[in-house]
């Protein structure tokens, strides 16, 4: 057996690792994604105060703390049987859309951006955020400025931008001051402007490039799975609230349910060789790590949300969504590299939603706490930037956490990411191309998901620094390639 | 000459790495003044590249995250050897942070996966592909290597990051420096404190606080009096109590003991024996989960006597 290790971890970061095994004939035996990192939040949240959970669980991810903060608050709303008053709901929803904007922007320009914005022959040393800033100085500065303003919205509402403190069971900490609303409304207009700019950049600098088109249509990056996403009553994606809709690989609705019932349709499989669990749809059962209409594997995140929805919620996003569907000519879109385009469309919807909510006079209403009942059990679900996020708590009568289970976006996608990596590896092994292209292609295959393996890889402009080691059947190192 | 900079993360949420972006366009000025020799989040330099560097050839290294695995410990030892100045960046490296609440001893693997989970390789022929074991306890940085300075916070606030770079890039870094105030957070909090006697400890979801008055006076457990300033009291301003992410002031020391002492002074003391004030005796009943509340970020650093006590109790019971 030959073994190829793509290892950003033991060697460099400790966050994710890809292992490729070949048989004696050089055919692919298996390729897996291993996550060797575990901080064990499910364990140490036991006994904590329920109202602290939004602030504890957000420490799972410092890139998407807003998602954990609000998934947690929603689980607590349910566990205390509380109705969230409109002003509190508006604060949360506006905050949440500002976060989606900010997070997607980060990936489009600085993380996925270098793959998309820089020519393919750019050296590794330049394929990072510094390279983007050098080639697109104006865009780079504008993005840093506008992102800082989006973060300002998060701080105005959340108290802090990274690791916010405002959400509580049944509502939020305090009414929003009037002057904060004025400031937010002014910023919102700039978010929408940058959204338009980014659509222009995508159609001028990215989509026309033959390299990107060939990636979009590449067979090995075409993965037929089911798709999950939150939708509103008109079947448009909603990041903060709605029903969980799952459509099949053929595009039929499999179910549309509130979060707690949807959670019951998800099973979790584990393997002893990784610390990440593999979710699957119970209706199909665990069929092993493979895609297709009869497998239980589904995907989440921008592409999945667009596949699970029938339209976008806002006008500019809808226009771009129609261009997206025209390009592929069919739905669901199974192209893994379409995640980037879907991210752009969602970023525009988020900006437009911020602008809309910023005008709502109820935003500064003083009724910000719903009445709390006795603590019990509750499920909260939101769409994190990277996909559906479930928090499920059981509380004691004193309002302490007895049990917690979380299914985070990149966990839902772990089977899909694993399969994308495997298919990419299979294609490259069959073509006999065990060279640096392997590194690039495999890196790009999982970067499309903007994965959050211990919140790491989506902040990696130059890509996960990887090394590939090729061993012969006797375990001797044949070649070592570095990215 | 540009200062050589390294940034590394161990058991981290990524928030510390993202926090540099909070400088906004100011980040461009910082980037123009440094040479990044190692920063997995940003550039492609490898561990091998790091190993090849001569000792003390990196001017400044910032480590964020708690030490959770054997590999974390190895990496920070390597960075220490290569660096002139090495600092703890963020609450996890500084104090252990939120993930160190796991040091209370809950079995992580069993809680996450259920009984019977044992790490194993995907194929028995490749035993080296077994996921690594965890350290028995999550540790702050200075338990494994000497630390020259601290940029505290969860994550460090933009103002402190800017203050740090200003000092570091002008050659003004002093050993032992902590980039936050020595004075308590209360000094920069706009809320009015009257040191009122409290009648009950209230949890944040139980009360909508008055926007002007001190949260502690209103019965909420706010760690402001024992925590360093430097964040402009961002949480109390937003209506939520301080949870201590900048770490205790030098005067406070152990934050739990210091805060309990502050709380005690706000509770009316009895002169006629324990039973004389039944109401007052129940004031602290609202202080549930004292470890998670008072040691939210600092359990690894200050919770050791408690952990020894718990072990001892188990031994006696056995």
Image: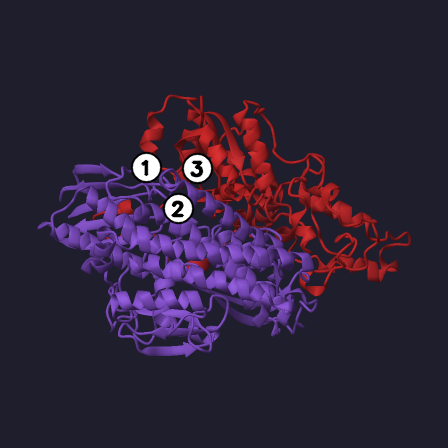
Chain colours: A purple, B red
In which quadrant is the C terminus of chain A drawn? Answer: top left
Q: Nearer the viewer, mark 3 or mark 1?
A: 1
- Tell which of A310 and A378 is nearer to you: A310
Give the chain letter at badge 1. A
Q: Nearer the viewer, mark 2 or mark 3?
A: 2
Q: Is residue A274 above or below residue B17?
A: below
Farthest residue, direction left: A25
Give the chain letter at badge 2. A
Q: How many marks?
A: 3
Q: Which residue is mark 2?
A: A110
Determine crowd level at label 2: few under 14, some 14-19, many 20+ residues with C-alpha closer than 10 A.
many
- Dot 3: element: strand
Instruction: Indicate the position of residue B70 as horizontal and vertical percent values.
Output: 41, 39
Q: Which residue is mark 3?
A: B8
Verify CB contact (< 8 Å) between mark 2 and mark 1. Answer: no
Give the chain letter at badge 3. B
Q: Are marks 2 and 1 on the same chain?
A: yes
Q: Which residue is mark 1?
A: A126
Q: For the point 59% across and 51% down, which residue is it?
A: A160
Q: For the point 49% across and 38% down, which residue is it?
A: B27
Instruction: Indicate the position of residue A139 as horizontal and vertical percent values.
Output: 42, 45
Q: Are marks 2 and 3 on the same chain?
A: no
Instruction: Tell me the CA gap for discs 2 and 1.
Output: 12 Å
Instruction: Tell me the CA gap for discs 2 and 3.
Output: 19 Å
Give the mark nearest the N terminus, 2 or 1: 2
Q: Is residue A267 above or below residue B311?
A: below
The answer to whether any part of residue A281 appears in the image is yes
Where residue B218 sits, quadrant-wise, is: bottom right
- Dot 1: element: loop
- Tell which of B299 and A246 is nearer to you: A246
- Dot 2: element: helix
């Amino acid at each position: 057996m030959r073994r190829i290790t793509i290892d950003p971890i033991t060697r460099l970061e400790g966050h994710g690792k890809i292992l490729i095994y070949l048989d004696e004939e050089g055919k692919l035996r298996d390729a897996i994604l291993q996550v060797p990192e575990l901080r064990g939040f499910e364990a140490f949240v036991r006994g904590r105060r329920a109202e602290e959970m939004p602030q504890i669980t957000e420490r799972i991810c410092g890139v998407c703390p807003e998602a954990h903060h609000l998934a947690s608050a929603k689980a607590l709303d349910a566990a205390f049987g509380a109705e969230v008053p409109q002003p509190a709901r508006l604060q949360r929803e506006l905050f949440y859309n500002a976060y989606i904007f900010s997070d997607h922007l980060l990936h489009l320009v600085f993380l996925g951006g270098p793959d998309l914005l820089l020519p393919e022959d750019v050296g590794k040393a330049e394929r990072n955020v510094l390279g983007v800033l050098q080639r697109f100085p104006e865009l780079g500065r504008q993005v840093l400025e506008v992102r800082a303003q989006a973060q300002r919205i998060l701080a105005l509402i959340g108290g802090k931008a990274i690791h916010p403190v405002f959400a509580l069971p049944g509502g939020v900490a305090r009414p929003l001051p009037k002057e904060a609303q004025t400031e937010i409304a002014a910023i919102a207009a700039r978010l929408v402007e940058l959204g338009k700019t980014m659509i222009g950049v995508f159609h001028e600098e990215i989509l026309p490039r033959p390299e990107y088109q060939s990636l979009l249509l590449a067979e090995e990056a075409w993965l037929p799975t089911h798709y999950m996403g939150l939708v509103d009553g008109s079947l448009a994606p909603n990041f903060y609230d709605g029903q969980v809709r799952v459509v099949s690989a053929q595009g039929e609705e499999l179910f549309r349910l509130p979060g707690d019932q949807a959670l019951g349709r998800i099973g979790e499989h584990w393997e002893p060789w990784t610390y990440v669990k593999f979710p699957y749809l119970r209706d199909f059962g665990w069929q092993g790590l493979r895609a297709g209409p009869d497998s239980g594997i589904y995907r989440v995140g921008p592409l999945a949300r667009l596949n699970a929805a029938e339209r976008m919620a806002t006008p500019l996003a809808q226009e771009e969504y129609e261009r997206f569907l025209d390009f592929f000519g069919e739905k669901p879109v199974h192209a893994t590299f379409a995640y980037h385009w879907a991210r752009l469309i969602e970023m525009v919807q988020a900006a437009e939603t911020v602008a809309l909510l910023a005008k709502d006079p109820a935003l500064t209403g003083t009724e910000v706490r719903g009445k709390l009942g006795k603590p019990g059990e509750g499920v909260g679900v939101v769409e994190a930037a990277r996909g559906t996020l479930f928090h499920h708590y059981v509380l004691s009568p004193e309002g302490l956490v007895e049990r917690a289970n979380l299914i985070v976006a990149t966990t839902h996608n772990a089977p899909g990411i694993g399969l994308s990596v495997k298919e990419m590896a299979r294609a490259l092994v069959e073509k006999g191309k065990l060279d640096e292209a392997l590194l690039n292609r495999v890196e790009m295959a999982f970067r499309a998901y903007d994965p959050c393996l211990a919140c790491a890889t989506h902040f990696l402009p130059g890509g996960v620094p990887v090394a590939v080691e090729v061993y012969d059947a006797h375990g001797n190192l044949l070649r070592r390639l570095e990215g | 000459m540009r200062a050589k900079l390294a940034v590394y993360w161990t058991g981290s949420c990524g928030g510390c790495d993202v926090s540099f972006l909070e400088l906004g366009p100011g980040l461009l000025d910082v980037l123009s003044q440094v040479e990044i020799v190692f920063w997995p989040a940003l550039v492609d330099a490898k561990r091998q590249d790091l190993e090849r560097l001569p000792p003390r050839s990196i001017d400044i290294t910032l480590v964020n995250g708690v030490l959770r695995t054997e590999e974390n410990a190895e990496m920070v030892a390597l960075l220490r050897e290569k660096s002139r100045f090495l600092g703890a960046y963020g609450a996890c490296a500084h104090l252990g942070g939120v993930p160190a609440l796991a040091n209370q001893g809950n079995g992580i693997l069993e809680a996450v996966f259920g009984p019977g989970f044992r790490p194993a390789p995907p194929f028995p022929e490749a035993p080296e592909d077994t996921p690594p074991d965890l350290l028995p306890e999550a540790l702050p940085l200075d338990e494994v290597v000497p630390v020259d300075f601290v940029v505290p916070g969860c994550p460090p606030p933009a103002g402190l990051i800017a203050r740090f770079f200003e000092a570091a890039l002008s050659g003004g870094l002093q050993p032992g420096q902590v980039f936050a105030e020595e004075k308590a957070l209360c000094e920069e909090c706009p809320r009015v404190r009257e040191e009122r006697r409290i009648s009950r400890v209230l949890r944040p979801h139980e009360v909508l606080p008055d926007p002007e008055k001190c949260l502690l006076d209103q019965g909420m457990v706010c760690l402001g009096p024992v925590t360093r300033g430097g964040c402009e009291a961002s949480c109390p301003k937003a209506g939520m109590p301080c949870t201590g992410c900048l770490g205790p002031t030098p005067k406070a020391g152990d934050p739990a003991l210091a805060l309990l002492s502050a709380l005690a002074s706000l509770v009316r003391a009895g002169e006629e024996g324990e039973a004389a004030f039944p109401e007052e005796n129940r004031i602290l009943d609202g202080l549930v989960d004292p470890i998670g509340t008072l040691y939210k970020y600092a359990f690894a650093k200050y919770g050791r006597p408690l952990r020894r006590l718990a072990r001892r109790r188990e031994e006696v019971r056995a």
